Image (cartoon, rainbow, N blue to C red):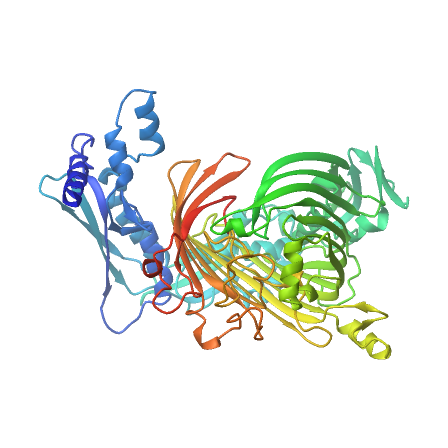
Amino acid sequence: MRVATVAIIVFILSACSGTKHLPPGESLYVGTRGISLQKTPPDGWTIKQSFLKKAGAYWAIWDLPNGDIAGFPSFRFIPFRLILYNWFYTEKPKGFSHWMMNNFGEPPVLLSAINPDLKTEKIVNIFENYGHFGTTGTNTVTYNRNRKKASVRYHVKIPKPYNYRTVEHITDSLHAPLTELTKRYHYSSVLQPGNEFNLDSIRAEKTKLWNTLQNSGFFFLQKDHILVQADTTVGNKQIDIRVRLDQDLPDAYFTKQSIGKTAIAIDTVHQDGKAPYYDWYNGRLRRHILDSLITVKSGQSYSLSKVRRTMRNINELGLFANPQYAFTVGSTDSTVLNANLSMHTLEETSVTFNAKGAYRATGYLGPALGLNLTQLNLFGGGENLSTDLDGYYYYPVGVSKEKISPSSGFSLRSTLSAPLLRPPFRFIKSTYATPRKHFTLGAEFNKREDYFTMNSITLGYSMSWRSGPKVTHRLSPIEVTFSDISNTTSLYDSLVAENPSLANSLVDQFVLGSYYSFKYDNLSLRNKRLGTYFEGKLEFAGNSLYLVSLLDNKDRDGVFGLDFSQFVELSYEFRTHFKLSNRSVLAFRHVAGFGYAYGNSSQLPYIRQFFIGGSNSLRPISARTAGPGRYIELQQGEVNQVGDIKLEFNLEYRFNFNARLSGALFTDAGNIWLLRPDPYRPNGEIRWGKLAQDSYLTAGVGLRLDVTFLVIRADYGAILYAPFFIDGKRWLWQNQLSLWGPVFGFGLPF
């Protein structure tokens, strides 16, 4: 029977030839066989920035054949989508076959579309742009017997690069301020003698010099007015570079401009320069708030960076849209520019309702109803209030979901945010964004049907700022959280009777602490192949209260009778996305956390402990049903399957079928552990030398449907390795248990 099945599959695949519907005279492209790079002369020199140059050449020929493996042009498997295309091929404009062909099939990749000769020219241009003038390239096309399939290999000969012998910045001696400026600029120029020729460096030089000129008052000079002249006739593969300005420009272009009169219009309402408020038709803003954000001032030299910074500051205030500067030459002095700033106000009050399917970080999935209230400029000082009220009913997902209680309730989160004009610390700067201060209030009523009702409230103050285009910091000097449980069930009471320490992490939890978080976000793959993301958080709690408790000799375990938590916790998340092709991405994530309770506390509060599992974690393991360590809970999960340490790794290969439907292959690994042995959770403590042996390993496949406003995700995974089994039974094929199942979610897992 198996032999017959295999024979039928082979017959079907061979019958659905990938060349069945090729146009006449065309060949199916089956992959690139690489690039042969040869130095001329071969000895006596090395290719500088070799990796960067070769990577550019490889990306130029990164043409994927049908059935590519993991987005690599040199590896090919059975082209299933091409087979579907041929199987359902039709020239009819509609019908089932047309739908299948266009949504699940993939047309053949033709050799003519690859155009090897054009790709050879691109490779040559890449190396010549790096100064390897005289680079030559050829390609070899290898056909099968009937010339229906073809692969390509490229051959490139690379000569020594040209270097800059001299670099001069030339200005007319009649323009003294400009001459002095270029002399100072010369030492920080992108182009320096001895460097290899690089076309990108030439472009960068023009941009940097233009910004320097604009920020020094030369308003009329544009980037196109900067000329870079290269003399390649000096011999010995050397180039003389001369950077100069177009000499046919009017004299006014070579004169510094200063700012004269300034004016502001909000919603076409021209503002009075003396009133304490800026007023418009339905609102007002304190004058000093907006004035502190405007860096273009009368009497200063014109500066493009100050113009950009002003518009950025106004946009970040969140009250106005489309701020624009219009500069006009003064009527009596051509060296003076009058600056007219205009902007439009945003709607100050908005209320929105939403019904959605949502996934929570706690591992639950289900419907939610929400209301959002936004009020801009609440007190006339740029304070923006955002309040969210949500009601939800969430179900557990994944294997062992029957061990987890459904979760229902409502939550309130309100944030009041305003510009932080006078930061209390010098390291909080406004170079890349206006620092902001945030006051937060959060409350949640959460019912776990099988266990208890948890009530929590959080109050906090924090400051955020940016130290780079992609870097965000947040510092909270104080955050207060109080949580408690009520309406406990008999099941919970029995758990507490067996494990009294469980109640210590749930009942009357009072957390007074501080935290600092750092975020680097460069994950977008727009115009690049590799994106990265990192976010880390360090939290301390209870130290100030502990000092106070030392003064209260009657209650050394609390403050005036109120117990509190004392701990330190470090957590971080790292992600990277690698764009393999226009239709495939390799995504990786690593999550880690470490918490340590000390002083007044013997364990972390429940709301700060780590858990693992869920549709965004180890799929298909349900949230809070794995760990800690090798501990296994056969009857109840969720409440006691938490830990002090967490390590998790996720890898996904994502590929698109069409604009709305995509697929994924994934594998996840990780676990949580206890720092100290717990007699009620045996084998839950961490074994530092056996982290891999004590971690779970899962793998699976998934489909994702993009319905514009939401991505619906369906994954099917299996637990390949479970550490709680005895030796010889930990792998799926050893324990022979049905440790697999579907997992549903919304959005991408990471």
**Image point (41%, 41%), residue name:** 662
Q: Quadrant of the N terminus?
A: top left
Can residue 19 be seen here? The reply is yes
Decide: is 682 above or below 63: below
Q: Nearer the viewer, residue 420 or 450?
A: 450
State the image coordinates of residue 165 (x, y, percent, origin top left).
40, 68
Q: Nearer the viewer, residue 54 or 479?
A: 479
Q: Nearer the viewer, residue 200 or 248?
A: 200
**Displayed quadrant of residue 478:** bottom right
User: In this image, 697 relative to 627: left or right?
Assistant: left
Can residue 582 be seen here? The reply is no
**Displayed quadrant of residue 283:** top right
**Displayed quadrant of residue 172:** bottom right
State the image coordinates of residue 436 (x, y, percent, origin top left).
74, 55
User: In this image, 297 relative to 192: left or right?
Assistant: right
Q: Nearer the viewer, residue 475 or 414?
A: 414
Count of number-bearing discs? 0
Decide: is 664 above or below 426: above
Q: Give the residue furthest to the left.
A: 145
Q: Give the residue furthest to the right.
A: 275
State the image coordinates of residue 149 (x, y, percent, origin top left).
17, 41
Decide: is 265 above or below 462: above
State the image coordinates of residue 750 (x, y, percent, origin top left).
50, 52
